[in-house]
Image (cartoon, grey):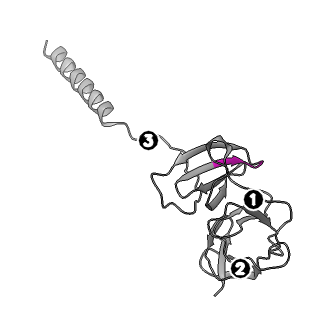
Amino acid sequence: MSAYAYWRSVSLLLAYPGGPEVVEETDGDGNNIGSPVTLHMTGGADLTDSDGFAILPDGDWLINSGDAINSYNQYNPTTGQEISGTTIQSHTTGGALCGDSTGVDTDGTNLFFDCNFDSIVEDTMSGVFISSTLTGGTGGEDISLVAAPPITPPSVPEPASLSILGVALAGLGLLRRRTRSA
């Protein structure tokens, strides 16, 4: 059974095992676009068991070498061929290598890895460790970055502001009524 990754812009899904692994673009509605691209490692063997996938700023794909393996390589998106000499590994606090890594994503400047099933580590594109965030225990696998939209303040006044305005208007109304009576 083949494993497939589907993408449209930066939306990705990678399934395994069994290979050969194939990447195919979709239109976002489940319709495939173009031909599938089979992934091949250096030396010619098909990639069969990866579970981390990211599209790099230059368009190359960054994919790990096997299930939970902390070794990622770049692949040519046209040919599916591994690009020699592009191996990247994620590091924990203190610079030690992650034992297991199952997910990768990028914000265009840094790479983010699922490390040891319990942390997300951030590395610069050069592989230098920046920070680690515990995910609350073990069992985390794969990651995806989603940029949240900016927070826009509400256009409706807060209830407290409306209350103050209401009291002030009522006070002005009473003051005007008192002035007319006098």
Q: Which mark is residue 44?
A: none
Residue placed under numbered mark 2 in the picture: 22
Q: Main secondary structure of the magenta part?
A: strand
Residue 74 spot, x, y in % from top left: 78, 64
Residue 93 counted in the magenta span: no
Residue 52 spot, x, y in % from top left: 65, 65
**Residue range highlighted in magenta:** 122-126
Q: Nearer the viewer, residue 61 or 162?
A: 61
- Is 62 placed above or below 4 here? above
Residue placed under numbered mark 3 in the picture: 155
- Which residue is outermost to the left? 181
Give amino acid for label 3. Answer: Ser
Disc 1 to disc 3, C-alpha distance: 38 Å
Q: Which mark is residue 56?
A: 1
| Quarter of the image where the N terminus is located | bottom right
1 or 3: mark nearer the eye: 1
Q: Quadrant of residue 7?
A: bottom right
Disc 1 to disc 2, C-alpha distance: 18 Å
Q: Earlier in the sequence, mark 1 or mark 3?
A: 1
| Relative horizontal placement of residue 83, taking residue 113 as reference (left or right) | right
| Relative horizontal placement of residue 33, taking residue 174 as reference (left or right) | right
